[in-house]
Image: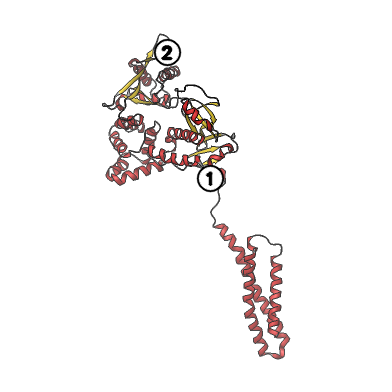
Amino acid sequence: MIASLFVRRFEQDMSYFSSIMNYGQRGPAFDIPAKKHIASAAKQAVLPSILIFLLILMTAPALLHTAILSGVAFAFTFAFQHLREARTGELLAPQTSRNHAVPIERPDTVQHLGFTVNIGYGLFSLVEDRKGAPLISRVAALRHQISRKLGFSLPHIPIKLDLSLEPNSYRILLHRMVLGEGAAWADEILAIDDGDVESLLKGRPCMDPTFGMNAVWMPARKRTLAVAKGYLVADAATVIATHLHDVAQRNAAKIFGAKEAQQLFDLHQQSSPKLADSLTRKLLSLEQITVICRHLLAENISVKDFGRISGAMIRACEVHSDVADIAEAVRADIGDLIVREIVPSGLPLPVITLDASLDSMLVKALKAGEGAGNPFAPRMARDMIHAVNIAIQSLPPGIRIVALICSPVVRKPLSDLLNQRFPNLSILSDSELPRSKPVELFATVGGPSSSQTMSATNAT
């Protein structure tokens, strides 16, 4: 009975002591599971303490008070030691887990190496699950479509809500650089005037962000009327996705890196290991292959037929050593692939040509400014841009994409001058044209007139 009373008293003392130790402490080390663990450790210390007390009591009954005091002191010391170890273990456990935890990066330090679409809160319904998230599904399908067309895998394209934007605005970014922006209304449609509209409809007038044609935003209930009037109609998700497709295709070279080149090379090595090994070990490094592919992608040339391109690289290395010259030689070797990207094989290629005198003058200008970053004189460059613009404006309404044909020497500098200003204009050298490909001439950019400016002559 004395032993049971001692045990009960000892458990009360341990409970009181534990409450004192926990007083004023906060945090995960002193949550409910931790208290239970400490109490369990204290209870485990009671049994050996009682056994020692009974042993002393049986061997020395005359010294009952001394035995009791000694047992209590020993039991208290033993239990306190277990209690301290349990508490120390609980304190160290969270600290150890924190030391081995994965560090969390701040949002401003996370870099996304691909395209991003930022939308205003007025377009949030386009990404809501309960409304089908049409923009998310369109962008996901678009990413796979672009990857198949360009020949390499495009990274994930996130859609983010940006409260700094106007409610109905959106932006397309690459590495935090804005490449495209526009406005859209989630519950309306965009009616685009492609030149065949019979009568105009009222709405919010604007320009189509992808093709630059006149358009109006109007309520979705007027879709049937807009189609009957000759408009091309698209909802907000389609407008943003189409704009993203155009931006991604024109900036594919900026996202293509060594990782994408290595993936292409690995796939090619599986099908043609000897050809792949000879390309990298003897002729070109992975960095040089990446630069050549970027040259092609910058002018909307797909790299999906990498086997054909690598073979052209090998043949070009026999003649050239500079990467830019190798890229131009590769273009001439795969000219049929380039033309196929512009127009299907069964249709003639729409072309604009340079007058022979103008082509000769440009060759002389390049030789005079050899090695310069911009070989054309400012006035010549300005007149050239103006003349090409007149030639493009004279095209029939149905012609959206056209090729400008020039000599091989002029092609690359002329492309650098005109590519960003005329995204739908392909600059080809006459050596890149397949002999069997029919062409349809629409205009000729002529030599200097009496006013020393270039002119565009309608070839028809």
> In the displayed image of the protein, which residue is found farthest to the right?
65
Percent from the top left, x then y, of residue 61? 70, 90
Q: Which mark is residue 453?
A: 2
What separation in Å lies between label 1 and label 2 (alpha carbons)? 58 Å
Query: Dot 2 lies on which element?
Result: loop
Q: Residues within 10 Å of mark 1 (few under 14, many from 20)?
A: few
Percent from the top left, x then y, of residue 358? 36, 16
> In the displayed image of the protein, which residue is found farthest to the left?
436
Occupied quadrant, residue 400? top left
Answer with left or right where residue 347 lies relative to residue 147. left
Q: Nearer the viewer, mark 1 or mark 2?
A: 1
Occupied quadrant, residue 91? bottom right
Q: Residue at x 71, y 62 (%)?
A: 24
Q: Residues within 10 Å of mark 2 (few under 14, many from 20)?
A: some
Report the number of discs. Answer: 2
What residue sits right under mark 1 in the picture?
129
Q: Nearer the viewer, residue 350 or 176?
A: 350
Answer with left or right where residue 319 lies relative to residue 390. left
Percent from the top left, x then y, of residue 430? 31, 24
Amino acid carrying label 1: it is Asp
Q: Which mark is residue 444?
A: none
Q: Quadrant of the C terminus?
A: top left
Percent from the top left, x then y, of residue 75? 66, 78
Q: Is residue 355 above or below residue 326?
A: above
Q: Mark 1 or mark 2: which comes first in sequence?
A: 1
Q: Is residue 323 above or below residue 414?
A: below
Q: Is residue 79 above or below residue 395?
A: below
Q: Does the rendering let one see residue 208?
A: no
Q: Is residue 200 above or below residue 135?
A: above
